[in-house]
Image: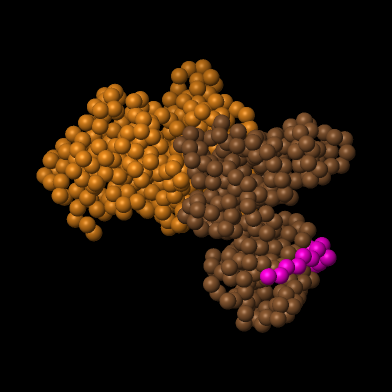
Chain colours: A orange, B brown
Amino acid sequence: MSRKFIIAIDLGGTNLKIALLTGGYEFKDRQTLRTRRFAQKDSLIQAIIDAVNKIIEKNCLGKADILGVGLGLPGPIDVKQGVVYFFPNIRGWKQVNLKKILQSKLGMPAFLDNDANLMSLAESKLGAARGYKNAVCLTLGTGVGGGIIIDGGLYRGTNSAAGEIGHIPINEEGPSCNCGGRACLEAYIGNDKIIKAARKLFRRNISLEELSLMARARNKQALQLWSEVGRRLGVALTGVVNFLNPGVIVIGGGVAGAGRALFDQVKKTIFSRAMKVQTGQLKVVKAKLGSDAGLIGAAILVKTGS
Amino acid sequence: MSRKFIIAIDLGGTNLKIALLTGGYEFKDRQTLRTRRFAQKDSLIQAIIDAVNKIIEKNCLGKADILGVGLGLPGPIDVKQGVVYFFPNIRGWKQVNLKKILQSKLGMPAFLDNDANLMSLAESKLGAARGYKNAVCLTLGTGVGGGIIIDGGLYRGTNSAAGEIGHIPINEEGPSCNCGGRACLEAYIGNDKIIKAARKLFRRNISLEELSLMARARNKQALQLWSEVGRRLGVALTGVVNFLNPGVIVIGGGVAGAGRALFDQVKKTIFSRAMKVQTGQLKVVKAKLGSDAGLIGAAILVKTGS
């Protein structure tokens, strides 16, 4: 095992998480900042640089002890070039060569990928998809992200943009989606859509956490709502199963906390609608690594260089 | 180039095609039989064996001159074991180890795959997907078949069942499909569905060929019908593009003969609904190898052993 350390960063719309990990993916230190404190692109990049330098110093390390910095980012990335295409939920980023900027300012290798890909990489190497050659991982949050593992490695596609499960249409016609398309899965079951449906149903503001708790307490309306989310997710995944024939589907992210009400319906839909050959050995499981999956995936990216 | 020859077989619901090819994939001889003459499984297997022996003899070759026999089959195959799971349109086949039977009766290596995979392999190595790392090929016929090329090779999935584009649901609810699911693409645009829609529209029996000719002659109703087929195909492919981010989509099979009326609508739907990063470099093209693609793919399978 390498005696060098890895710095992992997980940039979300809400939090900027930074961690120091060993070459064996153990956490040695970590810190969380609020993303919104850095409204401008340049101030956010500076915050990342400061945080990296700070965590190195704080742990009495030098740059020579660091194998590299891995970043999980909330939007599509040109992984080869290290360019951020844009962030759907953070303004001011368009065609930014973040890899180049960080490498030059930090003096160490930097690796970028989108958060859903890194979650998938982590679940594949150390989590719920471990041991499966072909896997599809998804993360249910503000958006519905996904990643594809083929032959044990991350499959990124032609423009490093593969895995967008949230943008599989589940109807010929339907609501407009942030992506410019319509009737996409995310246009039905993104967090804000679920919250909106809950508000309508209960005639008050209600958080996802509360809605999950209500389902666990067997509240009928909450169960019904989660079951509807699960059914729609199941329709999109039926297409994924028939088309890609993965060995396992891993579901993570905040919404996955709804538990059985959601999972049972996802499974019921897939196993009743997808083809028998494809579902014969298929597993549909919860993610194992929780909210650390992005950081772990970023560290794996640095360690393996892919 | 190998001085050995390859025997390729393409078994369809209607025709059993057999060909002798050089190691450079040139056709030296070919024959077509009617599949329906062989109602029983055993008589069909015997017909294959007889046809193989006959084409070897007729060309004054011996078994030592043959590298192997490649078979494209109209249903899901366990490629590793060489087992036919079943054929949707030919009765009496269930869990048949055709590879083992043929190898023992013919005394030469046999390789099996489904027809859509072999068409994809052929288009990838020698046809419209040549030069693309990641491709999705589909063949529009009785069923809607498909194959996935990843990193230049055929991706078969966990149970060699990947590529079933025809069984991606395009609506949450919709017509029952032969596969046991519902609202699958094929349940809307399989050949028989198109013919049925045409019969309703024109109040007489009408073949796909005639319907294609009518579209080329700018018949409004025929154009409208093909445009509807193209739009639905485009909805399923929007999901494929967002999820798999291929560099090219190749469309072949009889229905592809409808020409621009179909293609224009497929492209219009994909490029208006799919994500901009994924469609930035995407090509949507017609297959190049026509009805020989299955035979060529079967020969490639023998030659490359994969």
Give the x, y percent position of residue A40.
28, 24
| Foreground of the two, A140 or A214 | A140
**Measured along the vertical axis of the image, is residue A41 above or below residue B164?**
above
Residue at the left extreme of this rendering: A60
| Residue interval drawn in magenta | B28-40
**Measured along the vertical axis of the image, is residue A12 above or below residue A65?**
above
Give the x, y percent position of residue B299.
61, 66
Residue at 49% over, 43% down: B245
Q: Is residue B233 left or right of residue B200?
A: left
Residue at 29% over, 49% down: A302
Give the x, y percent position of residue A161.
44, 41
Note whether residue A295 is visible: no
Residue at 41% over, 50% down: A154
Give the x, y percent position of residue B82.
61, 68
Q: Is residue B181 left or right of residue B217?
A: left
Note whether residue B137 is visible: yes
Residue at 56% over, 49% down: B136
In the rendered image, which quarter is residue A206 located in? top left
Residue at the top extreme of this rendering: A203
| Foreground of the two, B115 or A54 | B115
